[in-house]
Image (cartoon, rainbow, N blue to C red):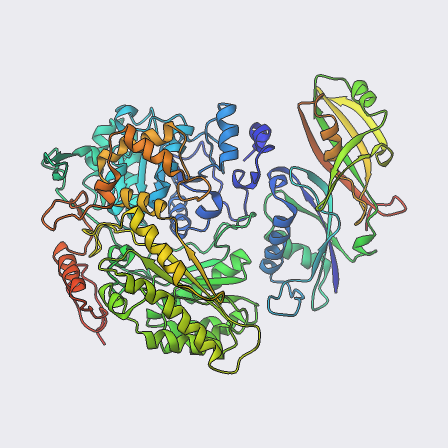
């Protein structure tokens, strides 16, 4: 874009490159020829948004169609926001530099609950009314505001602000919606007419076409469609054949350093493990793989088009990929020559692990992380994390034997049924790993075991969705307990802010009544809640008080199994019956086997060849 | 073989810092498909060097950058291969054999385009005496007079703006950022747009 009109603002911000675009492989079209102008918004900084694979895919999908021009915008950092507000300049896109208000459709991706305030702040910075009812009944006045991404499995906290929300995967659905928009706009239809049609497309949820009815005790009685042609439940969209779905191999190459500055290869969707706290593991079902041949070609093309020197294989649990060995071998036929590293995040600890790491490590060494999640076998069984202490110890032993002297372990505090014994188990497991290091002759430098402990946040569509989150006091007591149980400097202990996790729980399990809190938050200047330095708990408590909302009702209340949930009208694939069965098994400390061993009938209807 | 790339950095890309440009250059080299010489070690990266860093917000008509290839390659071919992957605003002027060490750069010429209510003469007058600024380095701040370091000054008006062209030291250990001049003038001007025009060696000849 021509930045001359913004030069006086950009001069005063820390990283102007966040707002100016012009990166290699950026797609610039003639905006006057575009029939639908789409602005894809990521409600966090450029560095985080540009690392997001979903954004990479969907912007490319949209630009692949002739009539649509899809540009990008990110949440401006506070220094830029100050400049924009001071000069009364509306937020603008990176490609054309046009204000967001000039677009036909603004699409937000909702990756985590703590970005909700950024969504509204971006609308506010664009001079667009927050509530969908305030935006009129014409497709010409204001852009259509749409959303998608993992958080939309419970879309209710944002329901009052969005015109349409996608449940599930977007590659096909987003084009179907823009097609419909284009046609309706051409024929001069009203927004309400468009929305009625949009509600007919599978996966697209039009919140304004549903009414929420409450019980006297503040719980939800039901969510009912207003018209008979509007589906009672919104069915999640999935892509059936991942080998055939569009995948961009010309990634935009950011100038400024972003979080994931590398080729990201999506290897499969879904997960067969069934960890009971994990939302992604449930809502991304069914399990579907890409073939090694397709992935290898994607990797080759992406590297050639980007100049990246690292390929990251991305999926929920990468070692579950059946063709992993084959894929790695294919990649290694050319990556070594080109000095390209392969990184495997989210590896599981098992026998396969070390042999694979040996292969991959031929170019670069990266950090080792494991996620036991809980400190005792009992609790690991409750959460269905099917690894044993012996698995963990043998993986550490191999890592130490291989010359490593530092590793990181992820745990969670506040899991259902957790006792103090489970918490102390985290410290003793870490201690055992340290002892393991010193049990053999090793280099003198010593060992560094980092344990990073997050706070459990109950999420919709998991077996733990009915569970209360620990109160703030209890969470902080547990954090202290663990800190005091660690007796060596060889173990570094990091933990998440329990207050931030509470807010996350509120919005994860929230309903439409939270919209006034979100609107109020924007009014009082609260945003970037996921950023420690900008999160303000006291301010949030004030916001909840002002809007007459009790956060504990959402985060810390045990929901009875027969209560209607705010997200019951969303059909995510996995059935409530399955989730109920799973939580029952959790209480009984009974594990559920991996889907590959036997089908548990979760309802997502995958097609796996059982071993 | 050693290769010197002469290029411009104009437009939006002025918002990209020197550090980010270095990373972009690595990608450009890798994308080109040329047989680049890499460093040894755990994290191999292309062997490369810039002449004089260019500050963020500044444009340049004359930047130089050295790298190495494992085999002799015609300069035309090198230029073609690099051109394909250059982001907008980074334009190749030419590719040639380095005639001097890249560290032999001595001075740089700049054009400052100043938005101000003052005339060229008034700006010239403001800069006629001591020019004392607070110079910041990584470790300390100190007040110093940079008047004698600003040479070959030309002032004129164009398009309602005051234009000033100056030559400043641009050695590795003696480099003056033209932004200090804008800083010094900040109470008298609205905006100052800086473009580097050329890099010279100790004899005042453009770096070859």
In the image, A277 versus A290, the foreground residue is: A277
* B166, above or below A487, in the image: above
Left/right of residue A107 with respect to residue B87 in the rendered view: left
* Residue occupying the far bottom of the picture: A441
Indicate the quadrant where residue A582 lies. bottom left
At x 61% / y 49%, what residue is drawn?
B20
* Residue occupying the far right of the picture: B203
* On-image quarter of the N terminus of chain A: top right
In the image, A25 versus A602, the foreground residue is: A602
In the image, B85 versus A67, the foreground residue is: B85
Image location (x, y in percent) of residue A139:
30, 27
Q: How many marks?
A: 0
Image location (x, y in percent) of residue A50:
46, 48
Camera sees residue A175: yes
In the image, A395 versus A209, the foreground residue is: A395
At x 80% / y 49%, what residue is drawn?
B173
* On-image quarter of the C terminus of chain A: bottom left
Indicate the quadrant where residue A340 lies. bottom right
Image location (x, y in percent) of residue A534:
44, 39
Image location (x, y in percent) of residue A294:
39, 65
Camera sees residue A290: no
* A580, above or below A50, in the image: below
Indicate the quadrant where residue A523 lies. top left
């Amino acid at each position: 874009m021509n930045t001359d009109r913004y030069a006086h603002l950009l001069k005063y911000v820390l990283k102007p490159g966040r707002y100016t675009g012009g990166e290699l492989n950026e797609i610039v079209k003639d905006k006057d020829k575009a029939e639908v102008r789409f602005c894809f918004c990521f409600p966090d900084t450029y560095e985080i948004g540009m690392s997001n694979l979903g954004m990479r895919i969907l912007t490319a999908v949209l630009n692949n169609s002739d009539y649509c021009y899809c540009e990008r915008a990110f949440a401006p950092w506070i220094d830029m926001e100050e400049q924009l507000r001071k000069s009364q300049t509306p937020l603008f896109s990176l490609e054309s530099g046009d204000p967001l208000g000039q677009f036909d459709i603004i699409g937000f991706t909702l990756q985590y609950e703590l970005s909700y305030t950024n969504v509204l702040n971006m609308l506010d910075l664009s001079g667009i009314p927050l509530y969908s009812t305030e935006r009129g009944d014409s497709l010409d006045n204001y852009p259509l505001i749409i959303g998608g991404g993992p958080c939309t499995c419970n879309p209710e906290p944002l329901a009052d602000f969005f015109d349409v929300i996608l449940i599930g995967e977007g590659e096909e659905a987003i084009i179907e919606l823009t097609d419909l928009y284009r046609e309706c706009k051409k024929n001069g239809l009203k927004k309400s007419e468009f929305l009625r049609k949009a509600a007919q497309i599978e996966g697209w949820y039009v919140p304004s076409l549903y009414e929420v009815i409450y019980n006297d005790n503040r719980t939800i009685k039901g969510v009912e469609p207003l018209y008979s042609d509007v589906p009672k439940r919104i069915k999640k969209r999935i892509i059936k054949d991942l080998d055939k779905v569009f995948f961009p191999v010309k990634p935009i190459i950011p100038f400024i350093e972003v979080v994931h500055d590398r080729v990201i290869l999506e290897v499969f969707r879904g997960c067969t493990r069934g960890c009971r706290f994990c939302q992604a593991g449930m809502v991304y079902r069914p399990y579907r793989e890409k073939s090694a041949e397709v992935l290898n070609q994607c990797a080759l093309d992406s590297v050639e088009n980007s100049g990246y020197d690292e390929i990251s294989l991305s999926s929920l649990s990468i070692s579950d990929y059946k063709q992993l060995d084959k894929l790695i071998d294919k990649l290694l036929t050319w990556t070594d020559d080109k000095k390209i590293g392969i990184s495997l995040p989210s590896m599981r600890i098992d026998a396969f692990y070390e042999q694979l790491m040996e292969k991959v490590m031929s170019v670069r060494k990266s950090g080792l992380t494991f996620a036991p999640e809980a400190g005792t076998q009992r609790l690991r069984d409750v959460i269905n994390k099917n690894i044993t202490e012996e698995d963990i110890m043998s993986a550490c032993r191999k890592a130490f034997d291989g010359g490593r002297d530092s590793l990181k372990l992820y745990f969670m505090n506040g899991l259902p049924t957790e006792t103090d014994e489970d918490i102390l188990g985290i410290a003793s497991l870490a201690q055992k790993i340290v002892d393991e290091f010193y049990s053999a002759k090793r280099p003198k430098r010593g060992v560094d075991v980092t344990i990073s402990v997050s706070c459990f946040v109950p999420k919709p569509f998991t077996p733990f969705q009915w569970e209360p989150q620990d109160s703030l006091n209890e969470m902080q007591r547990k954090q202290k307990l663990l800190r005091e149980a660690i007796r060596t400097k060889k173990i570094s202990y990091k933990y998440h802010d329990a207050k931030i996790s509470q807010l996350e729980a509120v919005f994860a399990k929230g309903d439409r009544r939270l919209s006034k809190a979100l609107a109020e938050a924007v009014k009082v200047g609260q945003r970037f809640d996921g950023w420690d330095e900008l999160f303000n708990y006291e301010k949030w408590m004030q916001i909840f008080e002002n809007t007459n909302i009790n956060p504990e009702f959402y985060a810390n209340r045990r929901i009875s199994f027969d209560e209607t949930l705010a997200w019951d009208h969303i059909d995510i694939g996995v059935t409530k019956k399955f989730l109920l069965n799973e939580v029952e098994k959790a209480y009984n400390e009974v594990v559920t086997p991996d889907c590959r061993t036997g089908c548990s009938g979760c309802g997502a209807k995958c097609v796996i060849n059982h071993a | 073989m050693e290769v010197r790339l002469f290029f411009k950095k104009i437009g939006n890309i002025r918002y990209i810092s020197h550090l980010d440009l270095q990373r972009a250059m690595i990608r450009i080299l890798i994308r080109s498909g040329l047989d680049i010489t890499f460093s040894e070690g755990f994290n191999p990266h292309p062997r490369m060097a810039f002449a004089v860093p260019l500050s963020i917000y500044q444009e340049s008509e004359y930047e130089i950058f050295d790298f190495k290839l494992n085999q002799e390659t015609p300069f035309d071919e090198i230029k073609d291969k690099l051109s394909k992957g250059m982001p907008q605003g980074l334009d190749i002027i030419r590719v040639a054999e380095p005639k001097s060490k890249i560290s032999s750069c001595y001075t740089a010429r700049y054009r400052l385009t100043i938005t101000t209510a003052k005339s060229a003469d008034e700006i010239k007058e403001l800069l006629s005496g001591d020019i004392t600024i607070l110079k910041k380095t990584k470790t300390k701040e100190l007040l110093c007079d940079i008047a004698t370091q600003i040479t070959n000054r030309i002032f004129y008006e164009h398009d309602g703006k005051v234009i000033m062209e100056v030559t400043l030291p641009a050695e590795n250990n003696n480099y003056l950022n033209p932004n200090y001049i804008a800083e010094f003038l900040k109470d008298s001007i609205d905006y100052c747009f800086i473009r580097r025009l050329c890099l010279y060696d100790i004899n005042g000849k453009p770096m070859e």
